[in-house]
Image: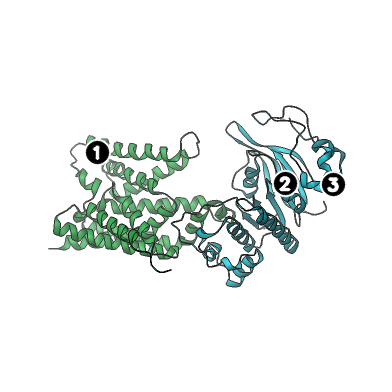
């Protein structure tokens, strides 16, 4: 009877746990706008997935990766700055997705659910994918942690010290793309980035090491998910935005809390 | 010059689009020798270092490095986002873990032993430079590459850093390539000076060069007697594209 709530909680917490360390990287590397651009392109992935009749999560990951690669290629030119480029790509991808979806005949899509999430419509099938994907991403982060930290500190130093920077940068993009695909159903393409960066930003004040920050971010993200779903359940508010509002409250609480003793 | 090369740039040219950054540069680097790269802004000094380090592929020419060469690199300045909680100790240990005694001795050797538990964000300019130097030394390098090592350091600190670099070279007998703006301070602690302005304008041992009539002709008699007053005077000038407009020095190839 309450299965869907349980599914939503498990799925939401899984994404929050994985989103903790990745969100930390997004904050450290100032990739918030990049994450947003990937998230916006997720809708295009959905449209293409329906068009070619492939698994939608896979379609989203592929679309995000294609966009990330496109961005890397475009960054080689020097006449348009990266943030302009990101703006162009983000909104073009979102608009292309919306146009493509509207052109799809005899397919009815709840656009609202993709834009703002539908945490309470998680199926057991979705849950299975989110859990498997989440474990894979977590394992990858654990395995790649040191080189990822090294390229975050300074890419040139890392390169000179023998780290294949381009490879790890790509791996990070791929991991973020996977989390976006997993989180899209929960909070929607417009809100995903907030779930990545808000817990990480809040965790900064609590942490003395990168690892602590990643773990606190996972923890705060999970609390936001539980709080948001609870709010949604009792106050009948939309689940995705409720989770984000909880994340905001936690961020503000920590940000304005009196400074702890050193 | 019986000293074998550690690394060599061989006829390296670098262009970004139509813009020529480096033009036919040859540069050998030796063990137990400090080579200083000087030149005006936009002369391609940092680009040259990036080519040497393999960060940038040359448009033409090649980079040869001794097989197994270990390079310690100290970048000009690094910007670590303040949201990344990081102590000096952790900074030195990522990605390669070093033992506590290695960390201590590297920091001690640059006079920064007390910084180990500091947050990397709380360091002053000079402390950061020392930390970066310690990081480069931890790799036990055969060749130390320093891109403006004294940037953001006050005058006293600069003198001290240069003395430190001289000591490190003496102690480890490694090769050193450094970029510098401040010729006054650097002339006394270098073995070989390369003056770069997209191409190598002139190069040589500072003292030998100073005694050379060509040098006196090149840099003016008043400067020949005192290295401390070394000035960057050319007998040729460059137009906006970096091409040599008139004159020539050292008989370099200015085609």
Q: Position of residue B135 (x, y in %)?
A: 60, 61
Gap between marks 3 and 1 measured at Cα: 75 Å
Instruction: From the image, state the color of chain A.
Output: green
Which residue in the rendered view is the most extreme toward the bottom? B101
Task: Name the residue tied to disc 3.
Answer: B208
Whether marks 3 and 1 lie on the same chain: no
Within 10 angstroms of label 2, few (less than 14), some, or many (20 or more) residues? Answer: some
Q: Which chain is cyan?
A: B
The chain that hosts pointer 2 is B
| Residue B124 visible here | yes
**SS at mark 3 in the image:** helix
Q: Position of residue B209 (x, y in %)?
A: 83, 44
Foreground pick, B55 / B226: B226
Q: Is B17 situated left or right of A34 in this image? A: right
- The answer to whether dots 1 and 2 both sit on one chain is no
Q: Quadrant of the C terminus of chain B?
A: top right
The circle drawn on residue A101 is 1
- The image position of residue B172, as x and y in percent, is 72, 63
Q: Which residue is mark 2?
A: B183
């Amino acid at each position: 009877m309450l299965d869907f709530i349980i599914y939503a909680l498990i799925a939401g917490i899984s994404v929050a746990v994985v989103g903790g360390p990745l969100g930390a990287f997004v904050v450290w590397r100032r990739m918030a706008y990049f994450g947003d651009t990937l998230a916006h392109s997720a809708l295009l992935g959905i449209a293409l997935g329906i068009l070619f009749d492939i698994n939608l999560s896979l379609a989203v990951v592929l679309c995000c990766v294609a966009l990330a690669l496109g961005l890397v290629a475009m960054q080689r030119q020097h006449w348009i700055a990266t943030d302009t480029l990101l703006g162009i790509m983000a909104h073009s991808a979102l608009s292309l997705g919306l146009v493509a979806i509207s052109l799809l005949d005899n397919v009815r899509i709840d656009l609202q659910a993709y834009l703002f999430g539908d945490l309470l419509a998680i199926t057991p099938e979705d849950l299975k994918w989110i859990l498997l994907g989440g474990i894979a991403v977590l394992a990858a982060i654990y395995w790649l942690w040191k080189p990822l930290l090294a390229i975050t500190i300074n890419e040139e130093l890392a390169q000179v010290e023998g780290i294949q920077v381009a490879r790890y940068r790509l791996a990070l993009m791929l991991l973020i793309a996977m989390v976006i695909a997993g989180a899209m159903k929960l909070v929607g393409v417009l809100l995903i980035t907030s779930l990545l960066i808000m817990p990480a930003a809040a965790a900064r004040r609590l942490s003395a090491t990168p690892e602590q920050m990643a773990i606190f971010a996972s923890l705060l993200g999970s609390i936001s998910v539980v709080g948001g779903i609870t709010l949604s359940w009792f106050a009948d508010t939309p689940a995705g935005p409720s989770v984000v509002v909880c994340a905001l409250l936690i961020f503000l609480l920590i940000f304005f809390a009196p400074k702890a003793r050193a | 010059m019986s000293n074998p090369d550690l690394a060599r740039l061989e006829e390296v040219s670098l262009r970004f689009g139509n813009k020529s950054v480096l033009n036919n540069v040859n540069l050998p680097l030796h063990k137990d020798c400090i080579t200083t790269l000087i030149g005006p802004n936009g002369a391609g000094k940092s680009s040259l270092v990036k080519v040497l380090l393999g960060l940038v592929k040359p448009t033409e020419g090649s980079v040869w490095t001794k097989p197994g060469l270990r390079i310690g690199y100290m970048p000009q300045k690094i910007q670590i986002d303040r949201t990344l909680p990081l102590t000096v100790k952790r900074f030195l240990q990522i990605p390669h873990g070093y033992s506590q005694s290695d960390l201590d001795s590297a920091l001690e050797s640059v006079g920064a032993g007390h910084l180990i538990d500091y947050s990397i964000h709380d360091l002053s300019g000079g402390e950061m430079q020392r930390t970066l130097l310690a990081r480069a030394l931890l790799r036990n390098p055969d060749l130390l590459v320093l891109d403006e090592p004294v940037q953001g350091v006050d005058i006293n600190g600069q003198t001290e850093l240069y003395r430190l670099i001289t000591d490190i070279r003496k102690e480890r007998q490694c090769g050193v390539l450094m970029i510098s703006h401040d010729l006054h301070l650097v002339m006394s602690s270098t073995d070989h000076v390369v003056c770069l302005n997209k191409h190598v304008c002139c190069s040589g041992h500072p003292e030998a060069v100073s005694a050379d009539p060509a040098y006196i002709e090149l840099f003016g008699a008043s400067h020949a007697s005192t290295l401390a007053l070394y000035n960057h005077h050319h007998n040729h000038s460059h137009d906006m594209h970096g091409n040599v407009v008139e004159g020539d020095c050292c008989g370099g190839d200015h085609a």
